Amino acid sequence: MAVELTPQELSRRYNRVARWYDRVEGVLGLLGVSRLRRRVLQQASGKVLEVAVGTGKNLPYYPHECRIIGMDLSREMLNIAQKRAAKLSMNVSFLLADAEALPFSDESFDTVVSSLSTCTFPNPVAALKEMARVCRPERKVLLLEHGRSDREWLGRFQDRHAETFAKPLGCNWNRKTLELIKDAGLKVVRARRTFFGIFHQIEAEPEPRLSQSFYNKKSYFYTRR
């Protein structure tokens, strides 16, 4: 049975663990995640939105010319990210917000980034749709995620232990990441799996969509008829 936490509950839980979150996540460094962060984030450019920025672990890997806004639903995690940005002498704006209702206009960003967060979104497709919405056409959505392994023996292990793993912080480690991305209307440009098929490095872009002005004209046409 899936563990479903509301955004409010996730916020409270991450606020409680923020002080020592980086120590826990240090295990991922032993699995080579820092190297994966560098590979993914070196592709970022222009005006960047990082969704679920957390404690700012990605900040050291961005190209210098990027103009970054980082958002998260945990105020305590954002406080740590702000301190990290200051130590790196980076001018980053931070915002408390929900990934499933981003407070930005359509096509606002050149690059949208999210890492190790799709597993925790209560509605991951809704969050990914929001990333697609705020990304400019033919620009990039960069994701470093983990999900259900494509090695069936390991995937079954993840399935068996998914509920136990998700209880503390809502991490659903057996979600099928690539399927979620496609369901959200994102076109996968490049994808690479590592560490027994668990980690994903993904470059995607929004699928072409008709402009709102077209829909308005179409609605007017049918009304007039």
Image: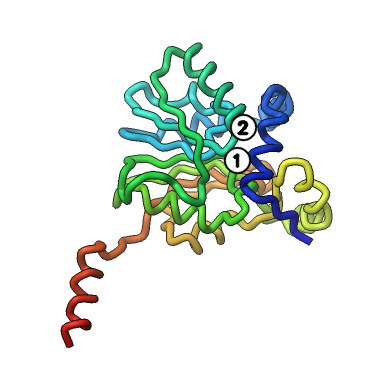
Element on which disc 2 rests:
helix
Q: In the rendering, at what x and y percent does residue 9 appear?
A: 68, 44
Q: Quadrant of residue 2?
A: bottom right
Q: Nearer the viewer, residue 9 or 143?
A: 9
Q: Nearer the viewer, residue 193 or 122?
A: 122
> Is disc 2 in contact with disc 1, using a CB cutoff of under 8 Å?
yes
| Spatial CA span between label 2 and label 1 | 10 Å
Q: Which residue is the site of mark 1?
A: 116
**Quick one: quadrant of the C terminus?**
bottom left
Is residue 185 visible from the viewing direction of this image? Answer: yes
**Quick one: quadrant of the N terminus?**
bottom right
Determine the residue positioned at 20% across, 64% down: 213
Q: Which mark is residue 33?
A: 2
Whether 178 is drawn above or below 119: the answer is below
Q: Nearer the viewer, residue 140 or 151?
A: 140
Mark 2 or mark 1, which is nearer to you?
1
In the displayed structure image, the side of residue 89 where residue 155 appears, left or right:
right
**Other residues around mark 2 within 10 Å, as few (<14) / some (14–19) / many (≥20):** some
Q: In the rendering, at what x and y percent does residue 33 appear?
A: 61, 32
Element on which disc 1 rests:
loop
Q: Amino acid at mark 1?
A: Leu
Q: In the rendering, at what x and y percent does residue 131 appear?
A: 43, 49
